């Protein structure tokens, strides 16, 4: 089970006015940016599988930072709520919404 990815997706279900932009590192060299909105994840740098059961955010990925952005997300002009959140700080937000 993709526990971290599912928790972040559920957070956006509970807070649909937010988009999470997650910067990760896979295998200590490959970076990716993942947008999570209303319970769905999509890679902004790699192809995303059509099957929602295929995790976009692998559990073994290292989360470098998370940005909270007001929805709707406009890449040309994002409205940041909070930038550069660590995983530890995000866990506190997850607990606030019961995750």
Image (cartoon, rainbow, N blue to C red):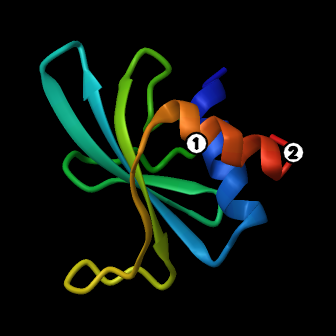
Image disc number at residue 67: none
Q: Is residue 29 left or right of residue 97?
A: left
Q: Is residue 13 left or right of residue 83?
A: right
Q: From this view, report whether residue 62 is shown above or below residue 99.
A: above
CA neighbours of label 1 inside 10 A, class few (<14), some (14 to 19), many (20+): some
Separation of marks 1 and 2 at Cα, in angstroms: 13 Å
Q: From this view, report whether residue 22 is shown above or below residue 17.
A: above
CA neighbours of label 2 inside 10 A, class few (<14), some (14 to 19), many (20+): few
* Element assignment for label 1: helix
Q: Which residue is mark 1?
A: 90
Q: From this view, report whether residue 15 is shown above or below residue 73.
A: above
Q: Name the outermost residue toward the left.
A: 29
Task: Residue at 80%, 49% (x, y): give it.
Answer: 96
Q: Position of residue 70 (x, y in %)?
A: 50, 79
Which residue is nearer to you in this view: 29 or 82?
82
Q: Is residue 30 left or right of residue 51?
A: left
Q: Position of residue 39 (x, y in %)?
A: 65, 57
Position of the N terminus by quadrant? top right
Q: Which residue is mark 2?
A: 98
Examine the rendering and report whether any part of residue 81 can be seen: yes
Lower sequence index among marks 1 and 2: 1
């Amino acid at each position: 089970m993709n526990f971290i990815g599912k928790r972040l997706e559920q957070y956006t279900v509970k807070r649909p006015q937010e988009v999470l932009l997650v910067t990760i590192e896979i295998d200590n060299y490959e970076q990716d940016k993942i947008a999570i909105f209303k319970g769905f994840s999509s890679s902004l740098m790699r192809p995303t599988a059509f099957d929602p059961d295929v995790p976009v955010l692998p559990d073994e990925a290292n989360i470098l930072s998370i940005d909270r952005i007001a929805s709707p997300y406009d890449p040309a002009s994002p409205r940041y709520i909070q930038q550069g959140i660590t995983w530890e700080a995000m866990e506190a937000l997850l607990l606030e919404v019961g995750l």
